[in-house]
Amino acid sequence: MRKKIVILWLLTGMLACAPTNPQKIADPLQKAPQKVFAKNIILMIGDGMGLGQITAGMYSNNNRLNLEQFPVVGLQKTHSYNHLITDSAAGATAIACGVKTYNAAIGVDKDTLPVQSILEEASEKGLRTGMIATSTIVHATPAAFVAHRPLRNMYEYIADDFLDSGIDLFIGGGLKYFNQQRKGDKSLLPKFQQKGFMISGIANDDLLDLNLSSTRKLAYFTSNDTPIPAASGRDYLPTASYIAAKFLDRGNKNGFFLMIEGSQIDWGGHANDTKYIISEVKDFDEAIGKVLDFAKKDKETLVIVTADHETGGFAINPKSKMNEINGAFTDSYHTATMVPVFAYGPGAELFNGIYENTAIHTKMRMALGFDEVETGTTTETRN
Ligand code: MG
Ligand code: ZN
């Protein structure tokens, strides 16, 4: 933003010296650069979703993905503080909190000190907040948005941190980290109820049958442990994405921040299983379609779709045909290939170009007006 203003200033200086009728030249400074704040952000993370995974999903879906509707595409560098190859914990912490940290860190910096996440900051500033995942909700990617722990496998401690995060809605697996199955028999669920949460899921109600008008906070557990793959019948992500956006938006002037993770694209990569990758990308893309439906009607929502890293060094090899992908892998772990960032809605243009994963945090703060934004003559912030 600052660079743009300097360029405009230089430009007007140059034009002033040129032997032209000044009245015919529009003064770019007369029109301050337009300040575009997004009221809401929906950040969608396809875990392990590199270009190969996206392409395989597209060519397995008759050459069509909802992702093609995004007008802005950028690339992010995923390396962590201590490794060229990141893990999901460090990758999510970079996006959520804006710091490069060591692999396995959850919402803490390289010295294990806690760093506030965009979700926590949004909640503090009066926005409503939520998360949805197709893993357990305490798994690395969602964890980095609400928890501050030195190691990603501290699942019960991460569950504790949900209580203080200010989050209004979460949907995902992992009930066993919240109820009486916890070590020492100390269920957290009564504490969530005291905070006004409606608690549901699993054997109880279908998400669509819940009477959500009677509550402002929702904890919905889709499974006791890890949710099943989409190919085995898991289908809640698209519906949950739309319901969550409507739920957080209802009667809310301040806006919301919602993180949605397609968690299992990564697991398909680790398993070197092309079909697993494709079914998870298709499921995630269906959720992207639902989110775009919401954003198109709402017009004040910035939608960002990206990944934390690529998994498997996945390639689409010769002998592949439309709807018949011959996938190949270089490894069963993550790779350091840059991953794409897609943006739609107010502030989308911020996501053009090539940048570090930590810049996504900065750009989201700018889009929400959390950062001071210079507009040429005045400095304005979101109130
Ligand atoms: Mg994940
Ligand atoms: Zn992984």
Image (cartoon, helix red, strand yellow):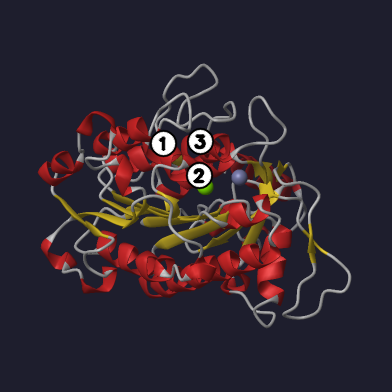
Q: Which residue is mark 1?
A: 117
Does residue 366 appear to the left or right of 324 in the view shown? left
Q: Position of residue 122 (x, y in %)?
A: 33, 43
In this rendering, the answer to whether 24 lies above or below 50 is: below
- The amino acid sitting under disc 1 is Ser
Q: Is residue 69 left or right of residue 201?
A: right
Viewer-nearest of discs 2 and 3: 3
| Label 1: which secondary element | loop
| Residue at position x 68%, y 35% in the image | 79
Q: Which residue is mark 3?
A: 93
- Mark 2 or 3, nearer chain start: 3
Which amino acid, by three-letter code, is at mark 2? Gly
- Residue 371 seen anywhere in this rendered image of the structure: no
| Residue labelled 3 has its Cβ within 8 Å of some atom of ligand 1 | no
Q: Which element type, helix, strand or loop, lies under badge 3?
A: helix
Name the foreground residue: 219 vs 123. 219
Q: CA distance from mark 2 to mark 3?
A: 33 Å
**In this view of the protein, which residue sits in the foreground, 186 or 303?**
186
User: What's the CA distance linking mark 1 and mark 2?
Assistant: 29 Å
Q: Residue at x 21, y 33 (%)?
A: 185
Q: For the view shown, which residue lies furthest in the bottom direction?
A: 62
Q: Marks 3 and 1, Cα distance to the nearest angstrom?
A: 8 Å
Q: Is residue 119 left or right of residue 23?
A: left
Task: Look at mark 2 in the image and give the residue it sits on.
Answer: 376
Across and down, in percent, residue 254 comes to 26, 53
Q: Quadrant of residue 100?
A: top right
- Residue in front for this viewpoint, 195 or 306: 195
Q: Quadrant of residue 20?
A: bottom right
Amino acid marked by disc 3: Thr
Q: Secondary structure at mark 2?
A: loop
Q: From the image, state whether disc 1 or disc 2 is nearer to you.
A: 1
Q: Earlier in the sequence, mark 1 or mark 2?
A: 1
